[in-house]
Amino acid sequence: MSGFLSIQGLSKNFGGLRAVDAVSFEMEQNTIHSVIGPNGAGKTTLFNLIAGSIQSDCGSIHFLNNDITSLESYEIAYRGIFRTFQAVKLSERMSVIENVMLGMHTKTSSGFLGGMMVSPKSRNEEVYMREEALRALKDVGLEQFALEEAGSLPFGSQRMIELARALVARPSLLLLDEPASGLNMKETEELTAKISVLKNRGLSTLLVEHDMSLVMEISDTITVLNFGKKIAEGKPCDIQKNEEVIRIYLGDDNA
């Protein structure tokens, strides 16, 4: 069993549909591990299981040698796993920096009451949160928009705000659920560069993505799902040559 992230025999049913079917894989630390497959393959369900948004029917999830299979999402976040979503989820009337600061709920202790009382501890924490939020915004190239309303920025920038909100918690494992969805070519290239920089800083990333050029460029390992089952796994060059993947996912034109 891997000491970082280990998925063993994970399954999830929704009524008569088996969305994830006995999936197993190991993810190494300081790598980018991508999960790909056609629509309905079970990719997002797998992410939701790892993040604790839903509970599995059977199988196990171990992270840093700890069993997190039955933990709630907030408990998993406290253990260092943070995620983004397919659909951008921002508080549009709040400023960009305030949205990013929301990602620090696992790193502060004063709480709501402490904030209302304006205690020295809460003031110090707010200073710390703003500094960390600015750092995360700088990582995604948006520090100059820190005081703007989040909803006033274009869609591509809003995706970067969500990424910054995940980064500000300094995750041990980042789950990116289709981060290039809705981005144009230039924005996708910028996203690819940012994810690569984060990897060079030692951030481990589990990625679900439909943009194959992005996946093939930055992934260390790729797991391929189809109808909830794992059908292939390997390095990008191996996946590109895998006949079953070509037939089921990439299409015959790539053969």
Image (cartoon, helix red, strand yellow):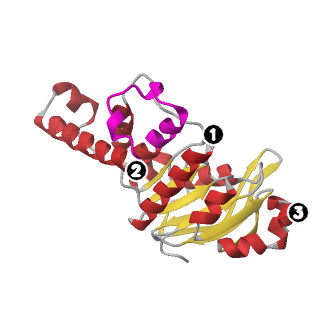
In the rendered image, which residue does mark 2 sit on?
167
Q: Earlier in the sequence, mark 3 or mark 2?
A: 2
Mark nearer the viewer, 1 or 2: 1
Secondary element at image label 1: loop
CA neighbours of label 1 inside 10 A, class few (<14), some (14 to 19), many (20+) = some
In the picture, measured across the screen, residue 36 lies left or right of residue 120, that is right
Magenta region? 140-162
Q: Earlier in the sequence, mark 3 or mark 1?
A: 1
In the picture, measured across the screen, residue 16 lies left or right of residue 96, that is right
In the rendered image, which residue does mark 3 sit on?
252
In the rendered image, which residue does mark 1 sit on?
182
Amino acid type of the residue tagged 2 in the rendering: Leu
Residue 43 position, x and y percent, is 68, 54
* Front in this rendered view, residue 227 or 95: 95
Q: Is residue 175 above or below residue 137?
A: below
Residue 90 position, x and y percent, is 48, 32
In the rendered structure, does residue 153 fall within the stretch colored magenta?
A: yes
Amino acid type of the residue tagged 1 in the rendering: Gly
Instruction: Report, in whole angstroms, how far the alpha carbon at label 1 lies from the one at label 2.
Output: 21 Å
Residue at 78 percent of width and 74 percent of height: 241
* Front in this rendered view, residue 98 or 148: 148
The answer to which image quadrant residue 70 occupies is: bottom right
* Front in this rendered view, residue 190 or 47: 190
